[in-house]
């Protein structure tokens, strides 16, 4: 580089009187802008907090609804096992044989799990139509040694904020060998 390229030039600084700067600050403040001409952020933190709060609440209630759905699915599985045990001990050689769906439905709705709507629960028992141990061959074949199968279904009302309400159908099947 040559010496002419490295030359420094002192330019005189221009001063702005304080009165003009103060007046400019007041004018910009009235218009919602600061001295640099950028709009101020008064109230923006309130909007950001409100939006963040909505997202946090959505997540919170969504997690709670999923927890309730898991609890309900646990109920459906347990109700299917309990109803199958009920059918297992109330076979044809029992003192009180049970072969009607209404017997199983009454038993499942009477289990009394908290937070479960009994009107949304359905219990459906089934037995093999023909069996080697059925003498005479009867329908249903609920003799000891045959199997009883119970399907429990529950219609879970899924409602998450800001989403369309829907019904989640949960089903569980259990099967055991009849003992009595």
Image (cartoon, rainbow, N blue to C red):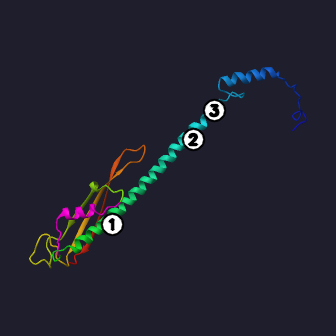
Q: Residue furthest right?
A: 3
Which residue corresponds to mark 2? 49
Q: Nearer the viewer, residue 4 or 108?
A: 108
The residues bearing labels 2 and 3 have C-alpha atoms spaced at a distance of 13 Å
Query: Would you say residue 166 sits in the magenta stretch?
Result: no
Q: Is residue 100 left or right of residue 6?
A: left
Picture coordinates of residue 173, whole percent (x, y): 28, 66
The image quadrant where one finds the N terminus is top right
Residue plotted at (75% across, 20% down)? 23
Picture coordinates of residue 66, whole percent (x, y): 42, 55
Query: Would you say residue 98 sits in the magenta stretch?
Result: yes
Picture coordinates of residue 38, whole percent (x, y): 67, 29
For discs 3 and 1, the disc positioned in front in the rendered view: 1
Which residue corresponds to mark 3? 42
Q: Give whichever of discs 2 and 3 has the lower sequence position.
A: 3
Picture coordinates of residue 161, whole percent (x, y): 43, 45
Residue plotted at (65% across, 31% down)? 40
Q: Give whichever of discs 3 and 1 has the lower sequence position.
A: 3
Q: For the residue labelled by badge 1, is the local secondary structure a helix, a strand or a loop?
A: helix
Query: Residue 163 bears which disc, if any?
Result: none
Q: Is residue 71 left or right of residue 154?
A: right
Q: Is residue 38 left or right of residue 65?
A: right
The residues bearing labels 2 and 1 have C-alpha atoms spaced at a distance of 43 Å
Which residue corresponds to mark 1? 78
């Amino acid at each position: 580089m040559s010496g002419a390229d490295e030359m420094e030039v002192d330019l005189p600084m221009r001063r702005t009187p304080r009165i003009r700067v103060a007046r400019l600050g007041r004018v910009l403040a009235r218009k919602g802008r600061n001295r640099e001409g950028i709009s101020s952020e008064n109230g923006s933190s309130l909007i950001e907090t409100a939006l963040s709060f909505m997202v946090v609440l959505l997540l919170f209630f969504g997690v709670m609804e999923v927890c309730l759905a898991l609890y309900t699915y646990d109920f459906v599985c347990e109700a299917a096992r309990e109803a199958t045990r009920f059918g297992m001990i109330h076979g044809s050689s029992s003192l009180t044989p049970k072969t009607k769906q209404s017997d199983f439905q009454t038993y499942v709705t009477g289990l009394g799990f908290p937070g479960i709507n009994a009107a949304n629960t359905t219990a459906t028992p089934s037995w093999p139509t023909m069996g080697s141990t059925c003498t005479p061959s009867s329908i249903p074949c609920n003799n000891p040694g045959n199997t009883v199968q119970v399907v429990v279904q529950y219609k879970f009302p899924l409602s998450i904020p800001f989403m369309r309400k829907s019904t989640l159908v949960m089903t569980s099947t259990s099967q055991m060998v009849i003992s009595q």
